[in-house]
Image (cartoon, rainbow, N blue to C red):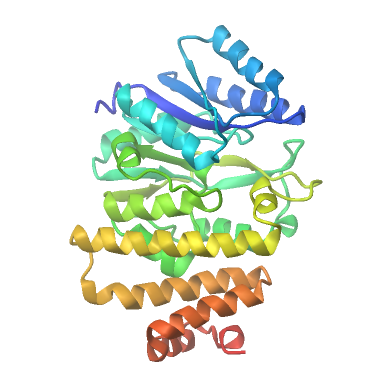
Amino acid sequence: MDFKNGTATFVMPHWRDENNITKKYLDETLATIFNQTDSNWQLVIVDDMSPCKEAVDYLDEVKAKHPEKIHIIKKTTNDGPGHCRNLGIRWAYENKSPFVAFLDADDLSDPKRIEVARKIFVSNPEASVVYSTFKVIDENSNLVPDNKLSPSIIEITDGHKHNPPQGPNAWIEIGTEKGYTNLTSATVVKTDLAFKYPFPAEKVSEDSHAWMRYSSGGKSFVYTPEIPTLYRIPQNTAGSSSRSREGGKSGFYRAKARVDIDGFSRAIEIAITNGKIMVEQRDELMIKFLLKLADTIQQEQEIEIMREIVAQADRMNKAVTDQIIQERGYSSWARK
């Protein structure tokens, strides 16, 4: 792959009902792509069977204006953003694009995103994934103050301020110490790696599942603060679509726990196969991961789910679980 001169690919899942605000979001997102300082890019928009004909027709209009830059894939089933990204990755792979930049249809990219990512991939052959921090914006594209953000979002942004995970085993630090780290719309990955480890057939936390396998199966994660993404979280709605699909907040976090546990488990097996870790490390790593996940979920006040995760760690090895709980100061909530 030619990282210096090859054409980067933005991969964007798309779904729209009759709500016109999503068209406004899409236009703002597209503007940030066309404002890239590095113009050597292409965009693949994958429509996830939008029920709104006007929305699908609008994608055709966008492509007609920029046929050399934009490619549209229209699905005939609704399978979620992970499946859409897989189709976009396949398109990039078949068209020999060296790296893909994920971007959801309502988030905003920094104008130097492709330029900075390209420089990192060219200067550092070991880099497999480049990610940045993000700032949260509302439905009107205004910055959301920290006191309006959920504990899990604060956990991510705080993790970027103090030694963000990097290197060949970033998945271990992310899974056992930091928690979720790289936002989808702030992640750029080498196409070969993304093609090898597709997003799972899930509609919740499918990105975290992929990142774990990218790290354990690839080379190095690289963090850069230079290209912060603007991540849209509307403040005057009932909640995210993923939470709604899973039956509210508790359903969402129960699904997230299931998918995250599977993702980390698969990352362990990939790392063992690749000789990155020893088989003997498997159980301790998994217990540390489970307890960090339980910590994140208890911060969201999902106590029942937290207790189920701690019980899973106990079943693996209660003595090791007790030791890690003590070392990490989790006793105040893990053993109540």
Q: In the rendered view, would you say 176 is above or below 10?
A: below
Residue 120, percent from left and from top: 33, 38
Q: Is residue 161 left or right of residue 59?
A: left
| Quadrant where the image shows the C terminus | bottom right
**Side (left or right) of 55 relative to 113:** right
Q: Is residue 285 visible?
A: yes
* Residue that appears at 41% across and 77% down: 287
Q: Nearer the viewer, residue 91 or 231?
A: 91
- Residue drawn at x 51%, y 44% is 184
Please name whichever residue, 159 or 97, is drawn nearer the observer in this view of the structure. 97
Name the side, left or right, on which 324 lies relative to 77. Answer: left
Is residue 292 positioned above or below 77 on the image? below
Q: Is residue 178 above or below residue 227?
A: below
Q: Can the viewer see residue 167?
A: no
Q: Residue at x 27, y 37 (%)?
A: 123
Where in the figure is residue 130, as x and y percent of width and height? 39, 43
